[in-house]
Image (tube, coloured by chain):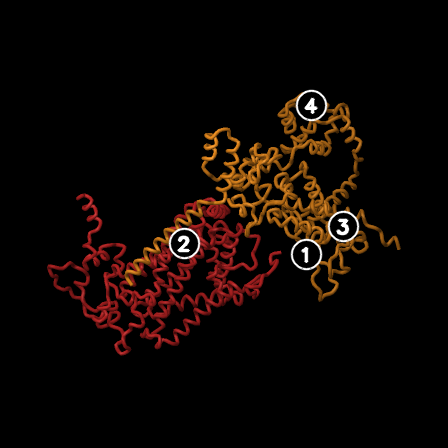
Amino acid sequence: MNLIREIWQSIVRRDPLSTDKGKSELVFLNVWLHIHPAKVKKENMKFRHTYYLGFITFFLFLILLTTGIALMCYYRPYPPQAYQDMKDLQFVVFMGPFLRNMHRWAAHGMVICVFLHMCRVFYTGSYKKPRQFNWVIGVLLLLVTLSLSFTGYLLPWDQLAYWAITVGTNIGSYAPLIGGQLRELLLGGHSVGEAALIRFYVLHVAVLPAILILLTIVHFWRVRKDGGLSRPIWKLKPKTEALVTIGVPAEVAPMQAAAASKDKTYGLMEVVTGKPIFETVTPEEEEDTVFSYPYAFVREAVVLMATVTTIMTMSLFLNAPLEELANPAKTPNPAKAPWYFLGLQELVSHSALLGGVVAPALMVLALLAIPYLDRNPSRRLADRKLILWLFTIFVVANLVLIVVGTFFRGPGWALVPPWVHVVGGAE
Amino acid sequence: MERKLQITFFALSLLALALILAAAWQANTPSWKTYQRSFLQLEAQGEPNAVAKAAVLGTPPEIHQVLLPGLQRVDRCTTCHLGVEDPTMKNAPEPFRYHAGLGPHIPSRFGCTICHGGQGLATDKEGAHGKVEFWPNPLLSKDYIRASCGRCHKEGEVPDVPELTEGRHLFETQGCRGCHKLNGVGGSIGPDLTGEGANRRSPDWLERHFLAPNVISTGSAMPNFHFTKEQARDLTYYMLSLTNEEMGSYFSSVRLIPSPEYGRQLFVEKNCLVCHAVGGAGAKTAPDLLGVTKRHSIEWLDEQLVNPELVYPGSSMPEYDLEANARKALVAFMATATPEDVQLILSKKPRALTPEDVAIEAGKQNFSRFGCVGCHGTELQGGVANPNAQGGEVPSLLHLSDDYTKDEVIAIIRNGRVPPIDNAAGPTPPLYMPSWKKVLSDEDINRIADYLWSKQQKAKDAW
């Protein structure tokens, strides 16, 4: 009995959870949980502030990681075996369809949630000082997510995959000077073939997930270091006060080592003085705080299970598409890029330079530069009318182009409403 | 609020568990297991006692599959069609019935889909029968199933499938290659037909297409050849058999069935009777072949056909470079050859041709083989409709010498030609003369010109 207690205590060294000390220690003695603060501000955890979109995105990534590893056990990245493996998943692997469906729907979900998360951060002005760089990391994460989805798109090696990647990489090749070479580097040749499949596979299962994980670590770390979740806009202080000290002031006092006291452990906060980099808590906000356990954890757990059950329910009833074996000699009409690139393809259909080069380059640059271009320190909606309108137009334009490209384009990229059935396009 | 959230969390966790169980249940109850249970019950009926019955019924369900790397397929059809190789299931209901009349084509060696089509990888009925979206090869209907023989047996006669032989013959004699490529040889006006069988258009579509090309695919440049219904069906058979799938050595070795009929054809072609006789009919230079299969073993005869010098040092018999099945066919013919039949061969022997005749005959062969007849007609009469070209049709070649020298004609064959247009504002005529210099050698082209010149009707003289 003693031995069991000893083992348990060697694993869990915190005080009982009934005590405040125990609640704190649960967080900061645990390597996985200590990304949380021991205490969180109640208002910051409100659903209508963040909609938990960042969490949902992260949980979708966890689903993708686990199902992805399971899928790797059944997949050979060379044609045409790759396609046969899809068929085996569909017909003979136990719960194979469920596995693949989960991976597919979680992947689409992640692209959508990353985008929505970005919109939330924008509308709440949470990219502003001191969180500018974390916004930049976020934009990079969006790009990595899109790349992951794009590289995964090819792997089933069916007609849908083959032509979506052919069209998608063609869009990229419109970039002047380097476009063609870049495409060749990515595909390992002039067209999508065996070499492209193995390259996409390596990117999809090794390179890009590694980059995503590294960037995610930085992203989470910065959330903590920038002062935790941003304050909801309804909690912003009256205009005159503006924010409490943000960033390192120019007149920062030189660092001084404080005299060590005997009854305290040493942490950075003990030896460094000067103003903090992050948002600080005012006394009235202090009353608003609660212990992360269980307040934050139960909310996160609910969101985790809601995400998992949603994806599972979808996977039970909706099957991921699998078309015919990839056939380079048989072009579907119209051949479409993955849905999130259809806005670009729509632009390309009007002007290759505009859709293939100018628009995507400007979009990425503008997104990256937003926190540095927007000099307005206020996060209040009323103070940010112009930029909110601009961003809304950007989002709506993107959505409209994607919807038009997805549902309103028929053979020959002609404008065909989805309720009109085009007969005999192939013959 | 906190309490509610905790309850929500547990409720959602239970839901997740339920969903996993539901997915597992879904995965564990595929339709093929139901079929296997019915089959076991059927089998158990035949067992004499309860113990044996229980043993049969206790067989665990499993997926049966035939792996055929040589045919590039995996067929799981026998997961449900459990009685195909079991003659006692002759009168069993489908899907358990015995497949009679397969000859050497046993499912464990050939699978099912190579003949029947469908999706061998699938384990549910609709998917396996290929009647689903995104599977281009649904099951072939009973009427056309024999077309599949041609997927392996690409040459010679296929017993019981005269449609295939006739379809191939029509394809080679009606000038289809003039517009269509097949295995790298042919024109490029129409689509390449090398893998046409793998595209699996519906047989019905193909048949109607051959009867009226313009009606089925509007704007098609393909002329109406006025095929009969039977001919359209023969061509459909041939189309369905065309595949560019690479098959393993075993399956490609059976291109040709070593039948005695084919052996007889070779026997005539290779002029065996110049030296040999059968029962006294024929020449006396080499041994009489009557009963030769009784005097020597099959292996000996095969070796003799490969390398006569090795078997009989100093033998004057030439090496014929015959493939294995051609040698087998010859041996099969020799086993059944009778003096009467050989006499018949001798009596039909055509007179020897002069060198000029040979050139013209070779030209005629080329004219047919490379598809010129498709547009210009078997008698050079032309007349195939070509809207908006001058005259509205492909010109006759019977009066070439009025307008061209032989060298000019050779140049046109080499480089091709777009026909002069009737109405400049109208559409481009669908048919044109392709360039042949990459397909035909200069010698071949010269022979075609010789052939054309031998057929010229001297219009000027007639005036």
Q: Is residue B36 above or below residue A323?
A: above
User: What label sits on residue B377 in the rendered view?
Assistant: 3
- Which amino acid type is marked by label 2? Met
Q: Nearer the viewer, mark 3 or mark 1?
A: 1
The image quadrant of residue B111 is top right
Asked which secondary structure carries label 4, the reply is helix
Q: Nearer the viewer, mark 1 or mark 2?
A: 2
Do the residues bearing badges 4 and 1 touch, measured as CB atoms within 8 Å? no
Identify which residue, A44 or A203, lies in the foreground. A44
Do callouts 3 and 2 point to residues on the same chain?
no
Mark 4 falls within which chain?
B
Mark 3 falls within which chain?
B
- Which amino acid type is marked by label 3? Gly
Percent from the top left, x then y, of residue B438?
A: 66, 49
**Residue at the disc numbered 1:** B220
- Give the farthest residue toward the top: B295
Colour assignment, chain B:
orange
Mark 4 and mark 2: span between their CA atoms? 75 Å
Disc nearer the start of the sequence (3/4)? 4
Disc nearer the start of the sequence (3/1)? 1
Asked which secondary structure carries label 2, the reply is helix
**Residue at the disc numbered 2:** A312
Percent from the top left, x then y, of residue B258?
A: 65, 33
Residue for point 69% across, 46% down: B233
**Residue at the disc numbered 4:** B292
